[in-house]
Amino acid sequence: MATMRFNHMELTFGEGQLTDELRADISEFYAQILGWTSMDVEVLEQKALLLAADEEVSQFILLAESPKPIQSPGYDHLGVLLETRAEVDAVLAKCRDIQARDDRVQIKEYPDLDQEVVVVRAFYVKYLLPIWLDVQCLEWADGAAPARKWTYK
């Protein structure tokens, strides 16, 4: 089987909703909590917003407008995997700090999920996107980590 990883996800907003002010708020928040960069891009004759998770822009979320925007009233989410518990806790602290000043930040905290061979440390955050982000790390028991793991080179 071929080696694969996800490249991007497109999320749609209603026509006229992706204003310059909304773009700026989204860009600032995700830059602060995850270090993502943003840029306006032209896609199918419309100005979309691209949130890049890496310098190569090989992992990104594309925000665009559509006459039929995404509807996600539940806990549909995109998982973001960090390396350590300390990194997850630092992002959570940043989200709480911003939430104290901006009530549009939604946070759902979870107790650690202990599966014996792996402990998942996670929380959900939602800010102006139509889905949640599941920010997490995996802490593997000694000898239980997968032999093959995706990494940057």
Image (cartoon, helix red, strand yellow):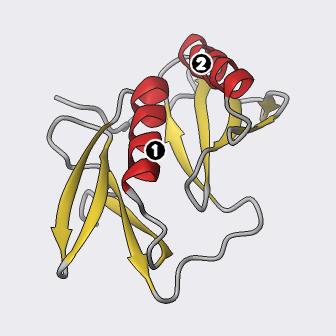
Residue 71 in the image, given as x and y percentages of width and height? 64, 76
Name the residue: 18% across, 35% down.
55
Q: Is residue 87 above or below residue 113?
A: above
Q: Is residue 143 above or below residue 47?
A: above
Q: Is residue 77 above or below residue 37?
A: below
First-in-chain label (2 vs 1): 1
Side (left or right) of 108 relative to 138: right
Quadrant location of the C terminus in the rendered image = top left
Residue 38 in the image, given as x and y percentages of width and height? 28, 43
Classify mark 1: helix, strand or loop: helix
Dot 1 alpha-carbon crowd within 10 angstroms: few under 14, some 14 to 19, many 20 or more:
some
Q: Quadrant of residue 64?
A: bottom left
Q: Which residue is mark 2?
A: 94
Inspect the image, locate mark 1, and give the three-letter code of the amino acid beneath it: Ile
Quadrant location of the N terminus in the rendered image = bottom left
Residue 130 in the image, given as x and y percentages of width and height? 59, 62
Q: Is residue 125 above or below residue 66?
A: above
Side (left or right) of 21 relative to 109: left
Side (left or right) of 115 relative to 48: right
Classify mark 2: helix, strand or loop: helix
Please count the marks in the image.
Answer: 2
Inspect the image, locate mark 2, and give the three-letter code of the amino acid beneath it: Lys
Dot 2 alpha-carbon crowd within 10 angstroms: few under 14, some 14 to 19, many 20 or more:
some
Residue 115 image label: none
Q: Nearer the viewer, residue 119 or 137?
A: 137
Q: Which residue is mark 1?
A: 26
